[in-house]
Image: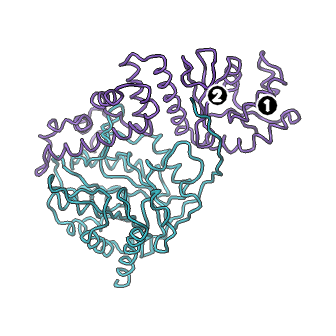
Amino acid sequence: MIPMIGATKTAFEKAKPRPLSETRSVPAIGYALFEENRHVLDDPALNAVEITFERAADPLRLGRCLGELDFAYVSVHALQLSPASPDPPARAYLDALRALAEENGAAAVSDHLGFTRDGTGGVEMGHFTPPPFTAAALDATCRNLDLIQDYFRGRPFFLENIASLFHFRGTMSEAEFLTCVLQRTGCGWLLDVTNLYANARNHGYDASEFLRRVVPAARRLQMHLSGGFFDAEAGLYIDSHSRAVPEEVWALYRQALELGRGKVAAVFIERDQDFPDEAGWRAEVRKARRIAEETEVRA
Amino acid sequence: MTDLTEPESPYAEQLRRYARALAAGRADDVSAALAEGSSPAHVMLFTEGNRAKRHEKLRAQLEFVAVAFTGFENLLAAYLRDRPPAASDTGAGDADRFLEWLGKTCGLTPEQHDYVACQRARHAVEAEAFRNRAGHVRFQELWATAQRRAAALDTDAGLRVHLNPIRAWSRFATAALLHTERVLPADVLFFAVGTEICTAVLEPKGRERIEELASYGPCTLNQWAGRTRHADGGELVELCRDLAEMGLVAFS
């Protein structure tokens, strides 16, 4: 039988963006939003939240996905802008992203440095992968980022470094490529510390050196922290967002806070599976704040 | 700058080869392009992970249709093998493409046809809400006061009638999904009510009135009555009250 479902009504209001002062030194800190962590979003250590578009954008939704909750900093995180594709992002997707950002008062939007598809009329791969680090890829990425930033004018855009199981042959390193992108477009860097740790471990480079090289090129930063595991069979560290943040990542986080002092807008912890108990949720966000405050005091 | 306006610029061609190989799980096709330290085995980890996630998502989205088929998993597996997701697919795009493929590939029984039609109509409503988010939100705001305003339809000639913009028609050939025996085939309207999708099975006259209203756009009852030759003002008032109760019209 076709279900006849009763109507519900939720008041819908557009929230005003609440940009965080860029001179503020201790970043806003919070979680990537999941139903499983809503119950700890009132923690005093937490004043930011990241909304992943693909999880929040029920086309029939009426109200804010944040409900009555209020945060100093909200960011909308996208998965399908595919900035390294030869074609620009689809207009409908941009419009939907902006609608979600407006409804929730988001101060920023972000997506990943990679491609999820070839071009219009082509195929979707299901996940992003890094482009070959070449001049042509740099041109395409920068052109798309210019379009994206122009579209979201007033809401800074942040580009995330991704964890990749493989790389295509190119003419420059990932650090060089990312530095050029940040310098040419002026977009922010969503530094995923765990992705950096995973890539450094899997592809054999120095994560600290990567930070020293790229952080100065970024006008503004957001950060992601998460935990994964080492897959002995594959010989790879997998950033699964399923474990507590490892000590090595906390150490890189400290270094990134020091290098990026004064321009880190927000830090988000990502946990997508094998969720911790309430104490675990609270402990991790408090640790992220404590480290940020200690870094500030030392400075 | 590289000329990116050419659809087949070397970079576009390069990414097309990579994306199609990765979407189809053909790791060997990109092995020559991998950087030192990367291997086809690493590529396979990537493609197999993507395929598993896609399979899981499709299975969840198509649960309703699956009950109408024996060997549904085999059909899904064949689709996953044959068809990569289309660029910029969002929401239920891949699931809808599967249903289209199913209709072309398998001889559907009339009941299976109805299950597929029902699911595709739900996808069409969601896709319309995605495209016309402002229209969806605005209509639902208006609809919140529709019951109260419907009472004034006889007396307030200035009230304008708005048709719910988030809707899609389907046609069922059997009674498999209908509550009661109807004259078949039956026209079924799917539409958004709040955050849910509701349905209405309408008589041919009801469908005609809905289509009239869709073509006129928001209008007063007098304007509607003046343009249609098939109903008088009194009939339209009653119709509007019924439609408002269902969530299909609202007033301003």
Q: Residue at x 32, y 63 (%)?
A: A226
Q: Please name the residue shown 11% across and 40% down the image.
A: B32
The chain painted purple is B
For chain A, what colour was chosen?
cyan
The residue drawn where x is 15% and y is 52% is: A234
Give amino acid for label 2.
Ala
- In which quarter of the view is residue A299 placed? bottom left
Q: Nearer the viewer, residue A197 or A174?
A: A197
Q: Chain of mark 1?
A: B
Q: Position of residue B129 (x, y in %)?
A: 55, 38
User: Which percent across, then down, holds residue A28?
Assistant: 45, 70
Q: Quadrant of residue A238?
A: bottom left
**Does residue B64 appear to the left or right of B200 in the view shown?**
left
Q: Residues within 10 Å of mark 1 (few under 14, many from 20)?
A: some
Q: Which mark is residue A218?
A: none
- Which residue carries the number 1 mark? B220
Mark nearer the N terminus (1 vs 2):
2
Question: Which element is circle 2 on?
Answer: strand
